[in-house]
Amino acid sequence: MTAATENAPLRPSLVRQLRDSLRGDVVTPKDERYDSARSVWNADIDRYPAAIAYCADVADVIASIRFAREESLPTAIRCAGHNIAGSSTNDGGLVVDLSVMRGVSIKPHVQLARAQGGCTLGDLDHATQAFGLATTLGVNSITGIAGLTLGGGIGWLLRKHGFSCDNVLSLDIVTAEGTLVTASRSHNPDLFWGMRGAGHNFGVVTEFEYRLHSIDIVLAGIALWPADQAREILRLFRELTSSAPDELKLIFVWLSMPSDPNIPTELAGRPAVGIAAGYMGSPERGLEALKGLRGIVAPAVERFAPQRYYDLQRESDSEWLPGFRRYWKSTYIPALDEPTIDVIVEHGQRFVPPRVVKHHAGVLVTQPTLWFEISHMGGAAARIDEDDCALPHRKIPYFAAATTVWSDPCDRAQQVEWASAFWDSLAPHSLGATYTNYLGRGTDEQVRTTFGAEKYDRLVALKSKWDPSNFFSGTQNVRPG
């Protein structure tokens, strides 16, 4: 136990009271598994909550919220703990953990799924893919569906079927008052509007209902070039995205390649640039859509093949292992014009890879390390009315993110400085706002800029109605008026 855990421990009588009110477990600093229980995905986050309540059901969530209110405890909601800024934990407060609540039920005949709030992407994909169905989710199977969906949800199916939040039909929510309500287009429609994009501000989602789509075999893979060809490949990416069909999702990536005898000499142990692609339709049509990849210069590596969508969803898991230190900066880019490309190339060349990155268990990582990406947006996501939900900026074509990762604490300053300088240099060429799930906590001004003045004012009114005391304030906080 460190000094941080001794600031304001819960009295034993309060711990007993909380334990007696739950079917699930409660972990405090006195328990042997406290250190593992307080850990979150981003190892750069190191916080010491007073208690962690593992909720077994909706009644446990209600009891935990009411307990936290009565005792005036700072409260964090944790499903999978993937928020980059550590919003799923705190110092000296209560963590309401839904990770045990991972039930999924599927109605394949009407293409609907209901999933509890503690589910991961892998849980939902596993259940839906048994019927050749899926909905838009992210690209890392251990990410929680809750945080992803409430902040938007970008994945391979975005251009074909919209953001994750666009595919939500209803939500069961425990409010700041500790009551259970349903939000949909017909029940509490104002809350339904706000939950889809800014839901972290209004309650704990205990169950999601999603619309599903038929998806099974897709074409996916990546083409790679040496990083000194970055300018040409960015132009190629711009050309391909200008005419891409909805089925085609393209991502420009800048990577650090491992030293591996199976990798071409010009890439092994060096920076590389690439275009990752997923065609969410016939693999034959996908091959036709990707012919343009060879239009400028032949890739050093070109690996595209038909595969199950379920396998594609787990393919990048090795890039997002827990136990690493991470820092993100991101923004929306209206156009990949030449000045924007100049900034990307200049700062990409400045990147200094951190010292040997190892898995948290000490196993050397031999996968490429992603540290910059541009995701092509648009398609179906851009055709949904901007006022349909709180999620902002759905019509901007590109989303760019610097995603640094390191293991040695001594590398932190260098990695944060590089990502921040990259973001600052992109600012004149960007929207000045970012995707809500990559914002972290954000200052009041950053949150307002991200949502835009009109949506922000509407969210303030909604917050004043559903959470006037600002009980849910842990991330991307919209303060009540």
Image (cartoon, rainbow, N blue to C red):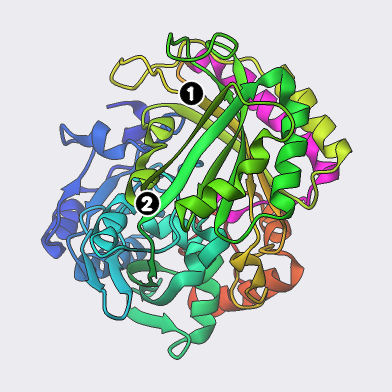
Res. 470 in view:
no
Secondary-structure class at tag 1: loop
Residue 174 sits above or below residue 134 on the image: below
Q: In which quarter of the image is residue 395?
A: bottom right
Q: Quadrant of the C terminus?
A: bottom right
State left or right for residue 312 relative to residue 419: left
The amino acid on which the numbered mark 2 sits, given as a three-letter code, is Tyr
What is the span of residues highlighted in magenta in the rendered image? Answer: 409-438
Instruction: Name the residue furthest bottom.
Output: 186
Q: Where is residue 43 in the image (x, y as percent from the top left)?
A: 41, 29
Label 1, on which residue?
368
Which quadrant is home to the N terminus? top left
Q: Which amino acid does label 1 sit on?
A: Pro
The residue located at (68%, 72%) in the rendering is 455
Q: Is the magenta stretch mostly helix, strand or loop?
A: helix
Q: Of the numbered discs in the image, which one, if any, rests on residue 309? A: 2
- Label 2–label 1 contact, CB within 8 A: no
Looking at the rendered structure, the secondary structure element under dot 2 is: helix
Depth order, front residue of 90/272? 272
Residue 188 at x, y = what percent? 46, 86
Tell me what residue is drawn at x 43 percent, y 8 percent. 261
Is residue 445 located in the magenta-colored stretch of the structure? no
Is label 2 or label 1 in front?
Answer: 2
Q: How far apart are marks 2 and 1 (CA)?
A: 21 Å
Q: In this view, does 396 lie to the left or right of 410?
A: right
Q: Where is residue 104 in the image (x, y as percent from the top left)?
A: 23, 65
